[in-house]
Amino acid sequence: MSGSSQLRTIQALRGVAALLVMMGHLRTIEARQSGATDAGERPLMSDIWVNGASGVDLFFVISGFIMVWVAGNTAAGPRSAGNFILARVFRIYPLWWLFAGLTAAYFWISYGVPWDSAELDRRGMDGIDYMIKSALLIPQAWLPVLNVGWTLIHEMYFYVVFAILLLFPQRWRGPAMLLWAGLVLVPASLGTSTFYASTLLELATYPMTLEFLMGAGAAYLIRANKVDFSRTAFCLGLLSFAIAFATFPLFLGFHEYLAWYRTLFFGVPSALIVYGLVQMELKHNVGQRVSQSLVRIGDWSYALYLSHILVLSGLGRVWFAVFEPSWTARAGFIVVAIAAAICVSALAYYLYERPIIRLGKIWTRQKVTTASPSSP
């Protein structure tokens, strides 16, 4: 989303989501690289930052919203579906291959093979098959070579199903999404939910898919333009998200229910926030008051999401090899690490991601467009 037609609130929320995920991983990396974990000390960043993982839930809601907002009103047929899925392939895979490839290179240099051999041996997995599925974002028994890629597996699944819906008339799409929600909700409620979706069946019935659909529902509700409870929705969503952020560690031990807890305590509030902010931007022009810095980070959010673990981990190894892990050294690392991760994501966006996206638009010869004030 770029240019004067972008929804600034959505782009800013993408920036917030990426920053939340980065902060969650930064807390873990600070604790590990500074030696706080081994020494039994508390890291400088508090335990609450583990909940930065909630940025993923916000990302899923935003993705569902954008898909409907951008392509929900396109004409039915194979051309619309094909253009949509090709646009998403160009959006997702090239940057994923870049940073997954860098991760594989790290493993190769460190262990002589482009994967975590100890983890794969423990699970009895074949390395070549693992790498192929990682590259293609296909579900398997363990996280992809760059572990944040597990969310992209869900993203691609959602895009494929949505592309199928574009084959059918517009009036069928909303009811089809309700049916889709039911097909997720019923089996997941009967106990098919898992901590990690390692098969196609587990992926299809994973509770966090409902977050995509909540985002899609927010887009349909705004398009219908029959009600406006934007301020109430935003305030309620923000308050409930903040409460969940402060209390969610209580539930981290219940791994079999973790996806459900996330969907309820972070997904629902995220949907209220997305609906409220976008509606207020359209009705009350709040987009002009959104921080330009957050909008810019929103532009870089996908690159930030994929690159930050490599940047933070690499910097941490060097930083704490040079500086004794004192309070000031840890504080300095946190500040420098945040700045470095954001700078790397900006470079990746301008030098690699944006040119690839432009190439994709030229190659498909048609940009997926609607009458909406937003573009992918």
Image (spheres, rainbow, N blue to C red):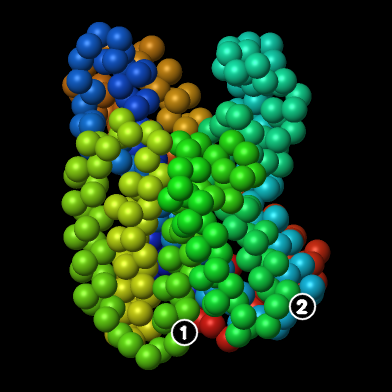
Give the structural element (helix, strand or loop) at label 1: helix
Q: Nearer the viewer, residue 147 or 289?
A: 147
**Above or below, 325 relative to 191:** above
The percent position of residue 261, horizontal first and vertical second, equals 33, 47
Q: Residue drawn at (41%, 44%), measured in percent from left and top?
A: 259
Q: Residue furthest bottom?
A: 226
Please name the amino acid that badge 2 sits on. Answer: Gly
The percent position of residue 23, horizontal first and vertical second, equals 34, 39
Give the structural element (helix, strand or loop) at label 2: loop
* CB atoms of marks 2 and 1 within 8 Å: no
Q: Which residue is mark 2?
A: 77
Q: Specify the quadrant of the image occupied by residue 317.
A: top left
Q: Residue drawn at (27%, 81%), measured in percent from left and top?
A: 229
Sequence-first tag of 2 and 1: 2
Q: Which residue is mark 1?
A: 223
The percent position of residue 50, horizontal first and vertical second, equals 30, 36
Q: Residue furthest front?
A: 190
Which disc number belongs to residue 301? none
Crowding around mark 1 (Cα neighbors within 10 Å: few <14, some 14 to 19, many 20+) is few
Q: Is residue 287 left or right of residue 190?
A: left
Using the numbered discs, state the Cα–Cα distance from disc 2 to disc 1 in whole angstroms: 22 Å
**Is residue 59 in view?**
yes
Q: Residue drawn at (70%, 35%), measured in percent from left and top?
A: 133
**Above or below, 305 relative to 1:** above
Please name the amino acid that badge 1 sits on. Answer: Arg
